Image: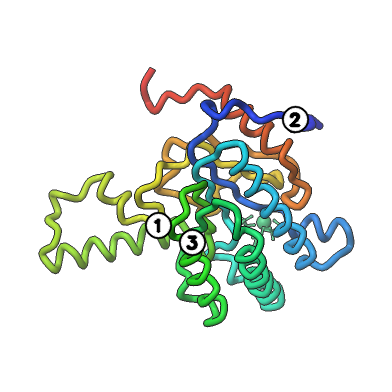
Amino acid sequence: MEKQYVSAAPAPECLPAHLGIIMDGNGRWAEKKGLPRSAGHTAGAAVFKKITRYASSIGIRYLTVYAFSTENWSRPQEEVGALMILFKKYLQDSLRDFRNDDIKVRFIGDTSKFSPDLKKLIEETREVCKDRTGMVLNIAMNYGGRAEIVNAVHEIAENVQKGMLIPEEIDEKLISSYMDTAGQPDPDLIIRPSGEHRISNFLLWQSAYTEYVTMDILWPDFVPGNLNWALQEYVHRNRRFGGV
Ligand code: IPE
Ligand code: IPE
Ligand code: MG
């Protein structure tokens, strides 16, 4: 199997402005080691921290990580519970650890469905980060691309009903401005580790012309050199956007 590892990152001017990562393979990593799936999520959270810092250090401007999908609620209650505990711990730690990092944490997805204490931490994190100017980190939690589009359609319909918008004004630019990623560039590259080759409801509207790189490695084993490899793949892609 190809090693999918490169020691250095491409030059900053070649990097994707917006990188998406589907952090997949935690469960299988744990099962392979005879551990409970939650141990895989704990290991995955540590990798998430490391890769976030690394992405910021090499000059990525926007990073969106898929942490929990709208469909992940269907997992066994025990696993969902373990994930919620981990999210709380991650946010508590990152409020401390990222205090001196210039990383602007944002949340995409419907965070209203989380417990009051998790929602409070989400608010605190937003508040602490609001004036930061470094890399934007979007954490997709209870996120689904379809749900995001449905919410946008609701809001647009309400604004038409209130007379604040006329149907003729609805174009691609306006729809983008109703998405959770409003004001941000569309992702240039999405990476999915774990050997799956599907999008699983991630950034559906935004990824119309995104380059997609899938990797064999499981997320808890992912190191900066693996990110460099994916970035190198991206650099060699010929993006045509429907042109010639
Ligand atoms: C990704 O890892 C983390 C979440 C979806 C929360 P998985 O838990 O999907 O791991 P696999 O795909 O079962 O190995
Ligand atoms: C996508 O992974 C969601 C996250 C990584 C958070 P899943 O493991 O839920 O996706 P499927 O079930 O393999 O499509
Ligand atoms: Mg999975």
Residue positioned most to the bottom: 116
Foreground pick, 86 / 217: 86
Label 2: state its secondary structure. Answer: loop
Mark 1 sits on what residue? 180
37 relative to 46, above or below: below
Image spot of residue 224 (x, y percent) = 71, 40
62 relative to 94, above or below: above
- Characterize the local packing of mark 1: few (<14), some (14-19) or many (20 or more) Cα atoms within 10 angstroms: many
How far apart marks 1 and 2 lie (CA) works out to: 34 Å
Q: Which residue appears at 66% of the width and 66% of the height?
A: 90
User: Within the displayed image, which quadrant is ligand 2 positioned in?
Assistant: bottom right
How far apart marks 3 and 2 lie (CA) works out to: 31 Å
Q: Which residue appears at 52% of the width and 66% of the height?
A: 125
Q: If you read the primary sequence from the N terminus, does the residue marked by circle 1 or circle 3 appear first?
A: 3
- Characterize the local packing of mark 3: few (<14), some (14-19) or many (20 or more) Cα atoms within 10 angstroms: many
Instruction: Name the amino acid, label 3.
Output: Phe
Image spot of residue 210 (x, y percent) = 48, 37
Is residue 131 visible to us here?
yes
Q: Which residue appears at 74% of the width and 32% of the height?
A: 4
Instruction: Name the amino acid, label 1.
Output: Asp
Is residue 75 visible to us here?
no
Q: Are marks 1 and 2 in contact (CB under 8 Å)?
A: no
Label 3: state its secondary structure. Answer: strand
Q: Which mark is residue 7?
A: 2
How far apart marks 1 and 3 lie (CA) works out to: 8 Å
